[in-house]
Amino acid sequence: MAESNATSDVVSYGYEGEVALVCVDNPPVNATGIAVRQGLVDAFKAINDEGKAKAIALYCAGRTFIAGADIREFGQPRKDPSLPEVCNALEASAIPTVSVIHGTALGGGYEVALATHARVALKGAKFGLPEVLLGIIPGAGGTQRLPRLSGIPFTLDIAVSGRHAKVEEGVDKGAIDRVVEAGDPRDIAIAMGQEVIAGTLPTRRTGDIDVTPDEAAINSTLAMVEKKNPHLINLAECVKAIAASTKPLMEGLAEERERIMRCIESPQRSGLIHAFFGERAVSNIPEAKGETRALDKIGVIGGGTMGSGITTSCLMAGIPVRLIEVQQEGLDRGVATITKNLDGAVSRGKMSQDKRDAALAMLEPSLAMEDLSDVDLVIEAVFEKMEIKKDIFGKLDTICKPGAILASNTSYLDINAIANMTNRPQDVLGLHFFSPAHVMRLLEIVQGEKTAPDALATGFALAKKLKKVGVLAQVCDGFIGNRILGHYGKVISYLVLDGASPADVDRALEGFGMAMGPHKVGDLAGLDIGYMTRQRRKEEGLPANERYGGDIADLICEREGYGRKTGKGYYLYETGAPVPNPAVEEIINEVRADKGITPKTFSDQDIVDRYMTAFISEAARVVEDGTAKRPVDVDMVFLFGYGFPRHRGGPLHYADSIGAKELVARIEAYAKEDPNYWQVPDLLRKMAEDGTTFADMNK
């Protein structure tokens, strides 16, 4: 019979013979909101009280099993019953229970399944405990029940990484009892309930199982996370909670609760939650919605590092690409790079060999730009020179079919000036990928003055197809990311001019949480792009009274090289790992002597404070003048394109932790040294006066 006993708006139960069926129907992902939690507790109590069933089978309607917490409750006061109470109630059921998993069982959803007495899954489903990605740990028994089923090493793997595992792997590890090839979740629930009654599907309370201690696994994982991610306290707390699984269940659950509360109260949780919501917020704008154009075939002009990476990304997403180069040598090099990228994806487990072969078969190399006549979108990825780009777009205007989108991968240049080389400026926009383009997730989508709404929406559609984070930007020199980088890059130069070494700056900012210091990043990306930009700006004329800080970087490019690609830059790479280049120290001393600078001493905190204050200042201006739509857009640009530490949420989220008043006071103090560079943004001053935050502007 159909479930007819509703215990809440989203949970119901009924009977098929001696099998009680409990259904969660809370679209879109059956999240564990209060209605689900209360409904489950009431349903299991009612079934146990009625005493008609010999087995209870829990399943979900829609496209997935319970896929985690209800994000609408994040940051809200707790409502009982809590999820730990729900899981304890399910496990305590006197009638044996089985959960039927389809789609995904993540976080609290998988913890619910762990609390039932058996777990059956549809083939292809996934499970996991990804709470660490939000700055917390599993808090409804995941760190205590999974070790009882699968052992401590597997639990450490799943819970500390936050990865999603296939249920087939779960069977091998004991985390899932059985995988069913196909079927409707309700029908499977009936069948599995009948097997529980027949004794052919064994059941047991997870909490009754003893855990085999494994101090070696605990200690090695704890040492690894403390060394690799010292800023993420939740990883260590997760390991310590799993270590407590050798205790009786209630004691272990109490320790898990204590450790999750430490995480909830830490600043990193706020940053990681902001990053989680921000990734979704950037595309939740009118410009990203509405009508889009076709994306059945893409053309890429340029087989260099960026063009090859963009092509790789498109091929991995299943989009055919026509790659254009001007010489056979360059084309061959581009195809070789793309092939290497795809082979790397296979070796890392990102795609199968068959998919790699299919992707490569969708690549059409060509030396004729005329072959772009039938593509839906062209992405130009050539040298960062305006004259070259203008010439290419003039040709594309006559070659490409009506309605084809013409995009430039420029890092800095004026999209409007490029669009004006065509008779179709409405079809032109910027698609600024970040290197390596097949790995980095950020895509700045740059709106020109005349870019048509459907062309802009297609840019966001492409980002989604490529599994990238698309962020809207307006035209200016450097858009959002590189414009801000251009500003705080000056303070990095000033710090080195005035007394810090490149290694000092890198060490301080890596201590702050950056994956790599800015000089190491420069060497990795190639110092030549920055060099060309500085030379262009010098030719155009630097602003009056600006202190030029690029002398050291210019001489390094001219005398030493462009970083890793040439074997040396700020660092030497003869042994693989970066070693400070002694020639750089000589260049620094030479420039300081020429400028009459007596070096000062900067502490790591001094470096971080100046760097972040400069960073926030220009980021505030970018929001103020509308280059970025909201503060969250700036934050996501730097989280996904520049390696800003995710646990800090982004530069403007971090700015709120400092406060506008303190930031204004810092800028005014620094301005005594250089009033031209250190100027208080109007927006920041207003925020200091009225007590508002950047978070207020995201609402």
Image (cartoon, helix red, strand yellow):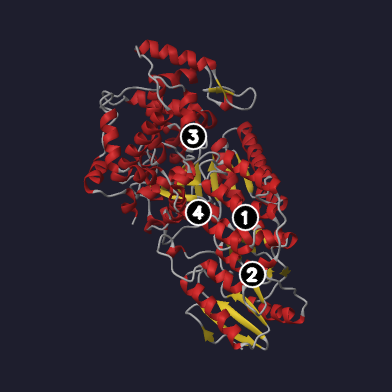
Residue 681 to residue 360: above or below: above
Which residue is under mark 4? 134
Find numbered disc 2 in the image and state the secondary structure of the residue it sits on: strand
Drawn side of residue 588 relative to residue 682, left or right: right
Which residue is under mark 3? 511
Q: Residue at x 64, y 73 (%)?
A: 99
State which tag comes first along the sequence, 2 or 4. 2
Front residue of 618/418: it is 618
State which tag comes first along the sequence, 2 or 1. 2
Residue type at the position of mark 3: Gly
Residue 356 to residue 492: above or below: below
Which residue is under mark 1? 244
State which tag comes first along the sequence, 2 or 3. 2
Image coordinates of residue 641 in percent, x first then y, are 48, 42
Find numbered disc 1 in the image and state the secondary structure of the residue it sits on: helix
State which tag comes first along the sequence, 3 or 4. 4
Image coordinates of residue 340 in percent, x first then y, are 67, 39
**In front: label 2 or label 1:** 1
The CA span between labels 3 and 4 is 21 Å
Residue type at the position of mark 1: Ala
Disc 2: CA contacts within 10 A as few (<14), some (14-19) or many (>=20)? many
The CA span between labels 4 and 1 is 22 Å
- Which circle marks residue 515 in the picture? none
**In front: label 4 or label 1:** 1
Specify the quadrant of the image occupied by residue 292: bottom left
Drawn side of residue 236 relative to residue 459, left or right: right
Which residue is under mark 2? 101
The CA span between labels 1 and 3 is 30 Å
State which tag comes first along the sequence, 4 or 1. 4
Front residue of 559/115: it is 115
Drawn side of residue 327 relative to residue 461, left or right: right
